[in-house]
Each structure stands twice: as C-alpha cells, then as structure tokens.
Amino acid sequence: MPIINKVPNKKISVNLQGAVGIASTDANILLIGHRSGVFSGAVPNYPQLQPKSGYPQLTAYRAYDLPSFSSGDTAISYMQSLGFTAKYGLSSSLVFPAPNQVLTSGNGLSNNKVKFKRQFLQASETTTEVTLQWNTPPTGFDSLVGSTKEISVIQVNSSTDASTTATATVQSVSLDPCQLVLTNVAGKFTTTAQVTVSYIDTSANVPDPARSDEICMMVYSAVNSINTAFPSTINTITPTISICFLNPMDTGFNPSSTPIQYLNSDGSNAVLGTVQTLANGNTGIYFDITPANFGVTPLTALGNTAISKDTTIGGTLVQVLPGITPGGAGIELKDIVGTFAVGDAVSITLDSTQNVFSLLSKSRQYPVSPYEIAKQSDISSSSSKFIPFFNYLNNANAPTSVNSGSFFAIGVVANISLSKQQAGTLPVFDTSTGSSIGAQYISGAYYPYVMKLGDYPLSAAIVASSYAGIIACNDIPFNPVNNVLLKLPVTADLTTVLNDSSSITTTINLGWTPIAVNSKSQVYIVRAVTGLLYLPGTEVPDTEYFPVTDWQIIGLWKKSVFQALSQPSFTNKRKSQQLKDGIINALQPLALNFETQGMFYNMAKLINEFAVTDDTEDAAKYNVVTPVCVTPEFNAIDITMNVVSYLLQNTTTA
C-alpha cells in the first residue's frame, strides 16, 4: 500500500490576537442525534443544561457541553437525569406462523364445565391462561427460552376488524412440547393467523437502541471509545462531548417545514385551555394538559417558527411559558394575525432555515452525523440532506475560520448497510470531476454489520460516534490510530464483517475507513483516512487517500501559527516590511519544531517559501502562506512467513 508523502499547502488568514506557543488540540465531539419530546421535572446539577421547572427538557438545535464521564454507563445515567429515554436490556421481535393448537386451561373442571368455560371465553374473549402450541419450533423460538426474558405476544386475526386482535404476556416457554404459556390474555387466539412475539432480554447489561433515544446511544458509544486503553505510543487527550438534538420528525439536518399538529397521547387534537394578553403586549396561549408531542417546541425563538390554527391565523414563537395548570404548558407569541380562542387546535411550523449548523459556532471540531451515507446522491445531489453538514465543514476549515476559534473540523459519518461484498459500491466523496464538499474534512467509517437473530441492533450513529471518540483523542504528535480497538459489538457470523484484505483494500481506495474484526473477535480501525483523493484544483489522483492525522496536524499548525502571531510583539503594530519579516522569523523555527516532534519533514527547504502578503479584501490584515509537508504515517508491515521443519515433512520408508 503506497504511503502519502504530501498534503496541499494551506493558506491561513490571521488576526493577531490570542496566546502563544505550540498548542495542544482542543478536541470537541459534537453528537447530533434524535430524542423524543420529553417533559420531566428532573433537573440536572450541571448549570448549562438546567431547564426551568415544568419546561420541556432541553430544546432542539442548540449545543450543550457535557461533563467528563468515566464510562458509558455513567453517561447514560446522566442522560436519564436530564429526562432522556435510555433503557437497558436488548429487545427484539419475531413473527411465528399460526399455532397448530390453542389450548385453554382446564383448572380441574369437568368436561361439561370446560365446554361452558370455552363458550364463556368465546363471548368475553378473556381468560387467565392460554397455551399456544406448534408441532415444530418456529425459527427463533429457542431465543425465547430463559428466565430473563420479558415476552409479549399479539395476534391480528383480521386486518379490517381491530376487535379481533388478541394480546397476552408469556408466562413460560418450553421446547418439548413447543409451547408458549400465556397469561393476561385479552382477545381470542386462533390457529389461522400469525403471531408476533416481542421480547426483552433483561440479562443484557447494555442500553437498548430500540428503546433509548438515539442521542443517548451516541453519547454512550463516544464515551466508551474515549475510555479505551490506547497504545502507549499514542499521546491522547480527553475530548469535550457536546450534544445537539434533532426532533423526532427530522429526517435531515434542516427542520421539516411541514406543520406539526399538537396532539394528546390518544392521538386527538390538543386544544387551548386559556388565551391571555401578556404584560409586554404579546399573547400567551396555554394547554391545560401538555400535548404528547410538545417536545418539538423550541424553548426560545427559532427563526420564524410559527404557531397557527389555520392558514389565516397565527403568530411567531417567542418562548415557551410555564403552564397555568400543574400539568399544562404555554407559548408566548408575537406578531399575531387573527385571534386565538379557547378550544382552538393549533400546530407548529419550524423555520427550516434554522438548522443545527446555522446556530453553532465553528469551533465544534468533530461533528458526528446520525444519518448514514448510503448512496452517491447523499454526497453529490444538490438536494442532499447532508448539504448543511458539508457547508459547516467548509466554513469551519476556511482560512479565516481561525478568527472565530476554529482551526480544523472533520465530519464523521458511517455506513453499515452495505455488505462487504458490496464494498466496491460505497459512495465516493472525491471524484476526478471535482468536489465542492471538502472531502478532506470527512472521514467515513465502514463496518458492514449484517445483524443476525440475537445480535446487538447496531446503527450508523453508534459506529460514527465510536469512531469519532477515537480520532478526537489523538494529540501531539498525532501517531496513527490504526489498529486501535473500538468498543463495538461483533456479529454472531464473523463472515459478514469486514475482515479480509480484498474488501479492506477496496474500502480504503474509495476513501473510507475500514472497521474490521481481528482474530480475537475485537473490532478495530484498520486505517483512518479522509475522503480526499484528488488534490484541490487538479484532476490527477494522488497515490491514495489522505490519513485523518494529516489534517489533524494541519489543524494544529494553523492553531500554532495563530497563537505564535498573537504575541504582543505582533499585535496592534503598524504594517511594515519589518513586521512581515518578524512573522517569517517567528514561524520558521516553529515549523522546524514541528519536524522535531515528528509531524513535518523536509522543512529546511520549505521554510524559505514562507510568505506574508497583504490581504486584498481587508487592508488591515496579512495573509500568511506556509507550505508544509506532513510526515508520512507508518501504516503497517506485511509479513510473509514460511516455516520449514522436518517435523512437518511426511516421511516414508521402503
């Protein structure tokens, strides 16, 4: 595998202010995930995350920094204290064919009484115990055996008549005969319809993705990666974890502009219980009972987010108000058109331009996408839901971004849906026709996790968060994170995961980071790369994709330049040739220091090409141009070993 030995020159526009010295990275992982609309009185002890009593727990499209956690389980407990949903134990569901027999409990009754009991059941459709029996065990039936399973069943006997649905909980399971003994039965089970079985394995001491908020699973995964035992050769830091919430209706980074009707828990329209004019002249509208989906409401104004009761009457959201009734909620509105009245059903329309990234500072260095990059249009289409994500990365890595505290950012995505046999069809971030998304600022983890019955229900969000946790820990001198273990589940069938050289090579050559499984059934990073293959401004491919560490070093260099030129000897100085020379003289030894640290090489020649030019757009600024060459990373050694021994020879005698 050829080794990268160059990176593009980086042009840095600098305002002369700040600290001095070779910096360490300021790693910040931004986890962007979904959560359900939650109301809770629980108040965390971390001030930045404290909602007011009775308010919805946190709001969408704002970032919050989390404290440090010693483990993923500690992080889950903290998220639960904020009102997020996180439940332990693995859940799954199975569909069985119609049972061959449906047996009801005799309870020692005579045949006549049993007949009478069955007639009674026919009328009331309830009983205390029913047994479903199959002649042969359905596929997956053995997974229900065990005392740690919480199991429920449902049978729909008619697609048009909801009253013919039967439900129950499972009291016991047996394989010989193949039976489910039911209790808490409602409705009538038959031998003519399929049975859906849902179960929770309470012995599994892990958070369940199916019953936990996505953002909780992302935090859990990132924290576990951060607390990985790194090789002693890698200098690590503890990144800050930030969380940003999408509401349950979001299918992309931009909020949906479709009106969302406020609903009660039974699906009926939530209606206003009180309408009043507030002291500041705005209008307060109140629900006596908090709508079940009220969690989609931002706590404060979000662009032109509007509340309306029809196409002609509405107002712009100002903030959420405490409810007048103990279980209620209110909303302050301004710019009212028409009149709201008690008994009105209302809906909310979020401002679709106010996405996560439009409200963030540019200093979030490792934003993690909950969405999977699954096809080429996710990257290339102008209507892709990833466009805000790509735009944020380009802005955060722009030459002038240093002035807002952003020195580099790498977006982390994942793909788990394509099998390793389909690795050649992975979307390509960078193409010969050019790419405007900044492929060098994207790193995609590829882990073809084909889940089998009983396996952990992995998601792209979990994989991306775990991977981000590893690369964000990498500090000076940015040794490669190749072969670092990830705390991810392994499939029951190892042939479905990426653990062969041909698929790994294919993956890397398409700009993806392969996540494979070693001989000890441990998940590890094969080689961490970004999506850039073609050098900016050219159509000539380089030898292979650039390592993530190349861009981390470039980011550290940008930060170090900014800090070095923020010394008092450079700030608030009149522009002059002497000042330009002073800048060059300060940066040349700094670059040589980077070479000593093992991050740059061949700098003796390149430092003579450092230049300071006048900025054409702002006469008060200089552009500092510093060609640098990042040291090639040490990838791996391929060892071929032939062992010859007489003990291995087959010998024969005449």
Image (tube, helix red, strand yellow):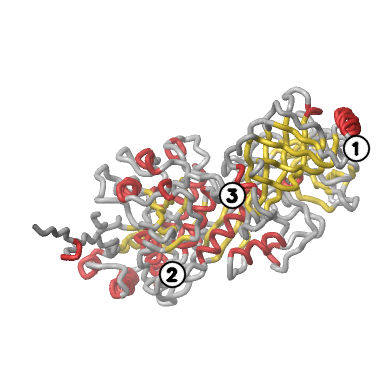
Vertical placement of 547 versus 171: above or below? below
> Which amino acid type corresponds to the residue marked 1 in the rendered image?
Val
Residue situated furthest top in the rendering: 160
Residue on which disc 2 sits: 230
Label 3: state its secondary structure. Answer: loop
Left or right of residue 352, residue 259 in this image = right
> Which amino acid type corresponds to the residue marked 3 in the rendered image?
Val
Q: Residue at x 40, y 54 (%)?
A: 516
Residue on which disc 1 sits: 342
Residue on which disc 3 sits: 356
Of the image marks 1 and 2, the number of the one nearer the N terminus: 2
Would you say residue 622 is visible in this rendering? no
The residue lying toward the viewer, choosing from 244 and 506, is 506
Q: Residues within 10 Å of mark 2 (few under 14, many from 20)?
A: some
Number of labels in the image equals: 3
Q: Residue at x 71, y 42 (%)?
A: 180
Q: Residue at x 74, y 29 (%)?
A: 190
Of the image marks 2 and 3, the number of the one nearer the N terminus: 2
